[in-house]
Amino acid sequence: MKKIFLYEPDAGIFEVIFLALLDKGYQTLRLPDPGHSGFKRMLLRDRPEVVIADHFLDVSNSTKLCSSIKTVLPEVAIIATSCNHDIEETYHQLGFDDYIRKPFDLRILFKTVSSNIKQKV
């Protein structure tokens, strides 16, 4: 079973994404905040194929999150979810490998996750 870490502060959005990915056969785990003491340990122990992370309005938090993940697992794909109007121009500069614009159709979520897992194989 492919593992996905999900970093989404909105409980409702987290639940929708979590259940949708679970239904497609992905093991989905909540990624703690990078400042959490178990952050690096969890990444190393569970080794996700993909991380899906909400892109914050505060750009420095997104950059810090991506940097913290890539320091531990440089090969993991990080997908931004964002309602920011300029996400398609900025996602790569922030450290993300791909993006999904909010609100999104679940088919786009599945397609983006699948293509990022295949790219890493």
Image: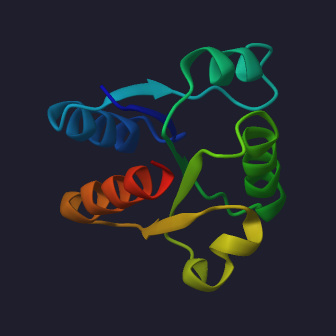
* Residue under the image location 32 percent in, 42 percent down: 17
Q: Is residue 120 found left or right of 73 in the rendered image?
A: left
Asked whether residue 85 appears in the rendered view, the answer is no
The quadrant in which residue 26 appears is top left
* Residue under the image location 72 percent in, 15 percent down: 41
- Above or below, comparing residue 41 to residue 81 in the picture: above
The quadrant in which residue 100 appears is bottom left
* Residue under the image location 51 percent in, 41 percent down: 8
Asked whether residue 89 appears in the rendered view, the answer is yes
The quadrant in which residue 109 appears is bottom left
- Above or below, comparing residue 114 to residue 40 in the picture: below
Find the residue positioned furthest to the left.
23
Q: Where is residue 66 in the image (x, y as percent from the top left)?
A: 73, 50
Q: Where is residue 64 in the image (x, y as percent from the top left)?
A: 82, 49
Number of numbered discs on residues: 0
Q: Position of residue 84 (x, y in %)?
A: 57, 75
Indicate the colouring scheme.
Answer: rainbow
Q: Is residue 108 found left or right of 56 in the rendered image?
A: left
Quarter of the image containing the N terminus? top left
Q: Is residue 94 found left or right of 48 in the rendered image?
A: right
Front position in the image: 75 or 100: 75
Find the residue positioned furthest to the front.
121
* Residue under the image location 64 percent in, 26 percent down: 32
Q: Where is residue 22 in the image (x, y as percent from the top left)?
A: 23, 30
Front position in the image: 56 or 95: 95
